[in-house]
Amino acid sequence: LALAKRAGLDVPDFRVKPCGRHRVLLVRRFDLSARGGRRHMVSFQTLMQAHGYYTLGYPDLFESLRRISDKPAADIPALYRQMVFNALVGNTDDHLKNFCMLHDDSGYHLSPAYDLLPDTADRREHVLHFGPDFHYPGAEKLMDLGRRARVAGCEGIFEEVRSAVLDWKQE
């Protein structure tokens, strides 16, 4: 989460605290409203009616966001930023339940990023595909995917994320 925040992703408030011999991650719930109660949250797995083994990818998420989001001008670049982050650190746990839409008075918008796990084993096989492949597609294909998804400033977003995660293994 610290690395994702440094890369410009919207992440929930969090902290790591010692607990005996271990450290625990505490994450503030982002589905609670300021007025009390829970905000409706729906996963992309539910939105896209994907069951069992599915072969969906980031291009499908961009299209869903265009249809559902009340803030596509903010949500599309945010999803692109998270896609680039996931690709660069090897977050291969990028399945549809780890992307959600939250509801508020204006409608549905992308939730903060959560459940971000780098691939320390360096397998690099993602659940969501980047186009024709489930493996890391490389910088040029990531930027091309951003252009095809009509993400304004995708090259700049890519560079911001890349420079923020260069030393991700040390983090």
Image: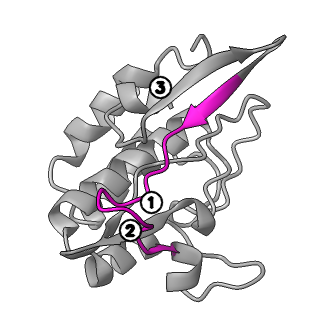
Asked if the residues shown at circle 2 and circle 1 are in contact, with their CB atoms under 8 angstroms apart, the answer is: yes
Say which residue label 3 marks: 3
Callout 2: few (<14), some (14-19), or many (20+) C-alpha neighbours within 10 Å?
A: some
Confirm whether the magenta stretch covers residue 33.
Answer: yes
State how far apart marks 3 and 1 are (Cα). Answer: 22 Å
Residue at 39 percent of width and 30 percent of height = 5
Q: Is residue 113 left or right of residue 128?
A: left
Q: Helix, strand, or loop for circle 1? A: loop
State how far apart marks 2 and 3 are (Cα). Answer: 23 Å
Residue type, numbered disc 1? Asp
Asked if the residues shown at circle 2 and circle 3 are in contact, with their CB atoms under 8 angstroms apart, the answer is: no
Residue 144 in view, yes or no: no
Q: Helix, strand, or loop for circle 2? A: strand
Residue at 42 percent of width and 39 percent of height = 139
Question: Can you name the residue that lies furthest to the bottom here?
Answer: 49
Mark 2 vs mark 1, foreground winner is 1
Quadrant containing the C terminus in the rendered view: top right
Say which residue label 1 marks: 31
| Disc number placed over residue 102 in the picture, else none | 2
State how far apart marks 2 and 1 are (Cα). Answer: 7 Å
